[in-house]
């Protein structure tokens, strides 16, 4: 079952292959996280994330001041509960502010941790209810799998890992309006990380990620100078690839999470 899950995740980009590609400017994602253990099984966490585009035209959260240097700011509050040695579940509330729109995400997640040939193997299913400004609410399933290994480095540890995530749209029982076409898989992320444990409570996690958005574009018809139709218009698939360089700083106030946790 685990191998089948991982195989499906690997095949999703092929199944969602587009006919054209565009590359977006590189984005920089710094993030701060604080977590706090509640009892033996609970973990509360708070995240504050920022997105900075290397093309300054996209950094328009505000017209002036410090926020004018950001494309997006996110604030997340979540809770994770250990259900057994291999299962964890939880919920998360996330608020994202851009120039437009502002968005609330209400999420539930379930995680399973195992091992494959000496590597830890985490799988996660997360459902998001997305309430976006001036738009109808929507839903999205996020399937992810991660392979990594915690390695000793002197008196501390480093953890290299690779993670793949696919996001699938959910209509929430509503029929699509008009002739609007949407691709079922609307986004994937492939991420390479290196989690460095500076102390027992402080971790630094730099990463590189390739984010791909999948959508349809309308190619308009072509007319001659006399107004005669030369080429019909058509709709085609497109991939928009965004390179992301990220840096996460994570601090634990009490119990340190292990590699199976969503907060590691």
Image: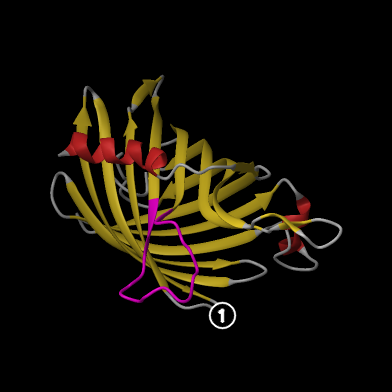
Q: Quadrant of the N terminus?
A: top left
Q: Could you say which is closer to the camera, residue 159 or residue 154?
A: 159
Tell me where residue 245 appears, x and y as whole percent.
59, 39
Residue, x 67% and y 51% (percent of image)? 52
Furthest-right residue in view? 225
Q: Does residue 11 lie above or below 183 as drawn? A: above
Question: Is 110 on the left or on the right of 70, as rendered?
Answer: left
Q: Quadrant of the C terminus?
A: top left
Tell me where residue 50 appears, x and y as whole percent.
60, 55
Question: Is 78 on the left or on the right of 68, as rendered?
Answer: left
Segment colored magenta? 167-185
Q: Could you say which is closer to the camera, residue 132 or residue 224?
A: 224
Furthest-top residue in view? 154
Question: Is 242 on the left or on the right of 117, as rendered?
Answer: right
Residue, x 66% and y 42% (percent of image)? 26
Which residue has dot 1 on it? 134
Residue, x 68% and y 44% (percent of image)? 25
* Magenta stretch: includes residue 173: yes
For the question of whether residue 174 can be seen, the reply is yes
For the question of whether residue 197 can be seen, the reply is no
Tell me where residue 227 appears, x and y as whole percent.
81, 63
Q: Does residue 71 lie above or below 154 as drawn? A: below
Q: Could you say which is closer to the camera, residue 17 or residue 122?
A: 17
Tell me where residue 13 appears, x and y as whole percent.
41, 40
Q: Does residue 101 lie above or below 183 as drawn? A: below
Of helix, strand and loop, which mostly describes the magenta segment?
A: loop
Tally the marks: 1
């Amino acid at each position: 079952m685990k191998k089948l899950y991982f195989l499906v995740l690997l095949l999703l980009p092929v199944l969602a292959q587009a006919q054209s590609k565009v590359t977006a400017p590189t984005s920089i994602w710094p993030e701060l996280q604080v977590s706090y253990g509640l009892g033996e099984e609970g973990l509360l966490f708070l995240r504050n994330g920022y997105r900075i585009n290397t093309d300054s035209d996209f950094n328009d959260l505000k017209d002036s001041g410090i926020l004018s240097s950001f494309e997006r700011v996110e604030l997340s509050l979540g809770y994770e509960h250990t259900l057994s040695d291999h299962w964890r579940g939880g919920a998360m509330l996330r608020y994202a502010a851009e120039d437009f729109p502002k968005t609330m995400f209400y999420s539930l997640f379930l995680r399973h941790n195992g091992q494959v040939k000496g590597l830890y193997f985490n799988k996660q299913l997360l459902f998001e209810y997305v309430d976006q400004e001036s738009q109808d609410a929507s839903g999205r399933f996020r399937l992810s799998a991660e392979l990594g290994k915690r390695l000793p480095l002197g008196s501390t540890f480093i953890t290299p890992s690779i993670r793949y995530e696919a996001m699938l749209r959910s209509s929430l029982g509503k029929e699509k309006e008009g002739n609007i076409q949407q691709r079922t898989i609307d986004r994937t992320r492939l991420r390479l990380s290196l989690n460095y444990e500076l102390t027992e409570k402080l971790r630094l996690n730099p990463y590189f990620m390739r984010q791909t958005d999948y959508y349809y574009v309308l190619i308009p018809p072509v007319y001659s100078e006399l107004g005669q139709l030369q080429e019909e218009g058509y709709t085609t698939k497109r991939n928009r690839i965004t390179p992301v360089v990220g840096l996460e700083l994570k601090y634990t106030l009490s119990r340190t999470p292990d590699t199976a946790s969503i907060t590691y």
